[in-house]
Image (spheres, rainbow, N blue to C red):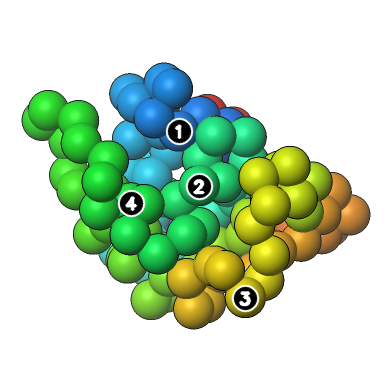
């Protein structure tokens, strides 16, 4: 698929239930890439930060879209999920609050990931 080249897809989700189609698109693209064997790093920012909490993805519904909880599970199983430090802090979300496997990190880590050799970043 990628001609043997190691690539990473960094997907930044900036929307949550406030913009459900944009949110679902970010998760769908990330999970599809992960299922295809691409290393994926999903960043939860803005309102999507809430999906770092247990049970929140299960509550998300969008007609004709794969369940967000299933998409998140695929990404967590094969890739990395990160909640933005500032976004989490604004919502009083700490490292003890998030789903196992979700990390909290800031802009420096995002820049490092997106500038790495072979990285492709998408923002939704």
Q: Residue at x 33, y 59 (%)?
A: 55
Residue 22, quarter of the rendered image: top left
Q: Earlier in the sequence, mark 1 or mark 3?
A: 1
Q: Which residue is mark 1?
A: 16
Q: Quadrant of the N terminus?
A: bottom left
How far is the residue under mark 1 from the one under mark 3?
A: 21 Å
Which of the labelled discs sits on residue 110, or is there none?
none
Side (left or right) of 30 relative to 49: left
Q: Which residue is mark 2?
A: 50
- Answer whether labels 1 and 2 touch (C-beta < 8 Å): yes
Q: Which residue is mark 3?
A: 96
Q: Residue at x 51, y 29 (%)?
A: 15
Q: Residues within 10 Å of mark 4 (few under 14, many from 20)?
A: many
As drawn, the residue found furthest toward the right would be 108
Q: Residue at x 62, y 75 (%)?
A: 96
Q: Earlier in the sequence, mark 3 or mark 2?
A: 2
Label 4 sits on a secondary structure element that is: helix
Side (left or right) of 101 relative to 105: left
Q: Which residue is mark 4?
A: 57
How far is the residue under mark 2 from the one under mark 4?
A: 8 Å
Location of residue 19 with respect to 93 vertically, above or below: above
Q: Position of residue 81 (x, y in %)?
A: 55, 62
Q: Position of residue 90 (x, y in %)?
A: 73, 42
């Amino acid at each position: 698929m990628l001609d043997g080249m190691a690539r990473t897809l960094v997907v930044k989700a900036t929307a949550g239930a406030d913009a459900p189609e944009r949110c679902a698109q970010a998760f769908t693209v990330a999970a599809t890439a992960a299922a295809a064997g691409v290393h994926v790093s999903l960043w939860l920012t803005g309102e999507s930060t809430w999906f770092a909490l247990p049970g929140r993805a299960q509550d998300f519904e969008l007609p004709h879209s794969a369940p967000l909880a299933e998409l998140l599970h695929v990404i967590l199983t094969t890739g990395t999920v990160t909640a933005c430090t500032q976004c989490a802090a604004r919502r009083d979300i700490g490292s003890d609050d998030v789903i196992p496997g979700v990390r909290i990190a800031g802009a420096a880590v995002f820049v490092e990931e997106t500038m790495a050799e072979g990285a492709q970043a998408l923002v939704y």
